[in-house]
Every structure is written in structure tokens, then in C-alpha cells.
Amino acid sequence: MKSIDIEIASDVMCPWCIIGYQNLAAALDELSNEITANISWLPFELNPNMPIEGQAFDEHIQQKYGLTKAQSLENRARIEEMGENAGFKFNFEGERIMINTFDCHRLLAWAKTENKQNDLSLAFFKAHFQKGIYLNHTDALLDIVERVGLNREKANEVLTSNAYADEVKAQIEQLKALGVNSVPTFIINQKYGITGGQPKQAFIDNLQKIVAEPTPQ
């Protein structure tokens, strides 16, 4: 049995991050007799200059990527299909927004110290992509924190201060220095990289190759 570390550079606004994670989790489940994995999440901001009030989802996607409305709908359908294949149901109904996720990343950095980072990250994805919860609202963030078993008052202290801000900024800059410019990026044992919302088999193949390599003497 080989143990590996997997760091996931991610932003909760990125649908491919949850698709990739779901496929990674499925791959690890299939390889459970060969590999155990320690998973952690690294911050990456897709929209660092986004104002706190956010922007309408369709407007943002069309402006940022130069898509027509028809192309945007086609892209959304593909995401929904890939999500369904990965076991994650997207819900794009209603008024959806894209936000600046810096506070989400600060909360995830704190949650790591409480051994709840993975739970909170997945809860953020579900809240945003399935329930349409606006993650730029403090009460919404605190409700999610509480639901995964974290302390609401401590989370509020993080949000109302600059706690973990320097750490998050430093991690983002470190990722950029390593050449990470898109998410998701899966960093294995601080050495190997797998990018994008890859299918399960791609994770299986890559992970098996990695653990099969001889350990340096």
C-alpha cells in the first residue's frame, strides 16, 4: 500500500474542480487496495478583482470567455453532462452569480487546522452549484461552516478579521510561481501535476504510474 499526498489547486466558482474531484475520489476508491491519499486544497482565485457583490453568472461567462448566449448554454449543458457522469448534479436554475472567493479560501485555510477542510470545500461546491446559495453573504458562509461541524463563532472571527489572508495570498503566489495558471490542478507528492476535470480512468492511470516509480535512494 502506497500513501500519497494530493493538493488540489481550486476555486469554488469552478465547475471543473468539483467534476475533477469527484472523478479523483472515484479513482481512489477503485485503487483503495493499492493507494491511500491525503487530500488538501490550495487556493486559486479565478476572479480576484471581482467586487464583493459579484456578477450575474451568464453575463460573467459571456464577457470573460467571449461566448455568445448560445455558446454559453452549450457549455453549461456539457458541464451538466460531465457532472452527471461524475456523480455530481449541477443546478443552474434561478439567479446565479460569480463572486470573489477570497473569504472562502480564508475559511478553508482555517478549516484545515480543524481537520475539516475537505468537508468544507465540498460543502461550498454543493451550496454554490446545487443550492444557488450566495457565498458572498456572511450568514450563508457561517451556516455552511456550522453544518460541517465547525464552530460558527470562530468562523465569524476569521471573516471579521484578516486571519489567514497573508497565508492565502502567499499560497496563490507560490502556485503561480510554479506555473499553475488554471484549475483544477492536482499536485501529487509535490512533484507531479494533473490538470483539468479529468475522467476517472485518467486519474487511475496517472496514479498507478506515479506509485510504480521507484523510490529515490
Image: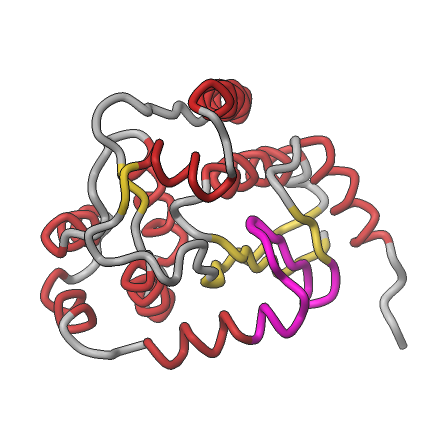
61 with respect to 3 (left or right): left
- Measured as percent of width and height from the top left, residue 152 is found at 12, 60
Residue 30 in the image: above or below residue 110: above
25 with respect to 102 (left or right): right
Q: Assess whether residue 190 is covered by the magenta stretch.
A: yes
- Measured as percent of width and height from the top left, residue 195 is found at 66, 48
Residue 191 seen: yes
Q: Assess whether residue 31 is covered by the magenta stretch.
A: no
Residue pictured at 38% horizontal, 66% vertical: 112
Residue 126 quadrant: top left
Residue 84 in the image: above or below residue 150: above
Quadrant where the image shows the C terminus: bottom right
* Magenta-highlighted residues: 174-192
- Measured as percent of width and height from the top left, residue 115 is found at 36, 62
Residue pictured at 74% horizontal, 59% vertical: 192
Q: Front-most of 82 and 33?
A: 82
Q: How is the image coloured?
A: secondary structure
99 with respect to 37 (left or right): left
- Measured as percent of width and height from the top left, residue 175 is found at 58, 69
Residue 215 quadrant: bottom right
Residue pictured at 32% horizontal, 44% vertical: 98
